[in-house]
Amino acid sequence: MAQDEQQLDDKAFAEAFGAAAAAAEKGEDPPVVDDKPAADQKTPEQIAAESAAAEVAEKAAADKKAAEDAAAAQAEADKAKTPEQLAADTKAAEEAAAKAVADQKAADERGAADAKAAEEKQKAEQAEADKKAAAEQKAKDEKARQEFEESLKDYEPTAEEAAAMAKFKEDFPTEHAVMEARLKATDRVINQRVYNAVQVVLQQVYKDLEPVAKGFGELTAERHVSAITKVHADYAAVQPLLGDWIKAQSAFDRPALEAAYKGGDAAAVTELVSRYKASKATVVAKPAAEAKPALSAADVADLEPVKSQRATPSNKGAPDPNDYDGAFAEAAAGAVKK
């Protein structure tokens, strides 16, 4: 195998040497012979990429060497400087680095401000475009609405059309009468079709809304009764008695009482029941108080209020001013007698 490769190399060398010698005799440049196999040939793109990569690597190496040389030169120069000079150089370097950071920050802020301004400008332009499009659409819709409303109005013939119809009626009275009858019949057919279509739509709407209306009515009635029973727990028992009681009232009071009874809100009905109970001296009995142990004379003395604020005791047989239930019942009975 190695012998075969050597023979091929010798042959290629001999051919290249012969070609170069022939060219030299003619005074021409020797031809360049590509001794690589066809499989190893590279495309122009590959060659360009490799060349660019080589240039980048060469530049990076040169930059690294330059930085190393600069650092070495700086170190050599620092050997001859005093500590004060070194401190000054360090401070200058730090200030330069801080300035670079500040400059970069300012550049970033300017870039952000410019980007924000551009975004706001774009938004404003978009809003203006949307506003213009909305105005155009509104004008288009308004024009369509006006045209539709105009189409619903009775048609007014022009002067020429009116004259032609009058002439037609004069010259052909029979045909004109037949045409008028036909137009009236057609008009009624159209009206009937529109009416039937509307009825179908309304029936479907009523069918869909009926459960909603029923549920709303039941909920409203439940809330109405609940508000009344919060004040009058016996409203269910009193309600059937209100009609006859209202009829027995004076002509002056009856209209207002009937209005509250038939269509009043919860507050009005509550007031109505209160007036009914007052007229009937209806008092809700209080639960019996629990028996308490008898107090001793000392306990009674301790519970006695201060003399300067003590109420004057009532005469024997007179009503107790603190008996509010008894006073209300007595007043109600007096009102019924009147």
Image (cartoon, rainbow, N blue to C red):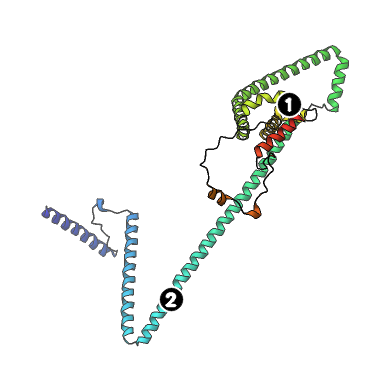
The residue carrying mark 2 is 96
Mark 2, secondary structure of its residue: helix
Which residue is rendered at x = 40% and y = 78% of the image? 93
Q: Is residue 154 above or below residue 144?
A: above
Name the quadrant containing residue 227: top right
Single out the residue that lies furthest toward the top.
174
The crowding category of the residue bearing disc 1, from other C-alpha atoms within 10 Å (few below 14, some 14 to 19, many at least 20), is some
**x, y (%) of residue 245?**
72, 25
Q: Is residue 21 above or below residue 172?
A: below
Name the quadrant containing residue 23: bottom left
Which residue is rendered at x = 61% and y = 29% of the image? 234
User: Nearest the camera: 315 or 269?
Assistant: 315
Amino acid type at image mark 2: Ala
**x, y (%) of residue 55?**
34, 64
Real-space CA distance between mark 2 and mark 1, rounded to the nearest whole angstrom: 101 Å
**x, y (%) of residue 63?**
34, 71
Is 19 situated left or right of 154 in this image? left
From the viewer's perspective, is the residue at label 2 or at label 1 nearer?
A: 1
Which residue is rendered at x = 24% and y = 62% of the image? 20
Is 23 situated left or right of 139 in this image? left
User: Nearest the camera: 145 or 202?
Assistant: 202
* Earlier-in-chain disc, 2 versus 1: 2
Is 91 situated left or right of 36 in this image? right
Label placed on residue 246: 1
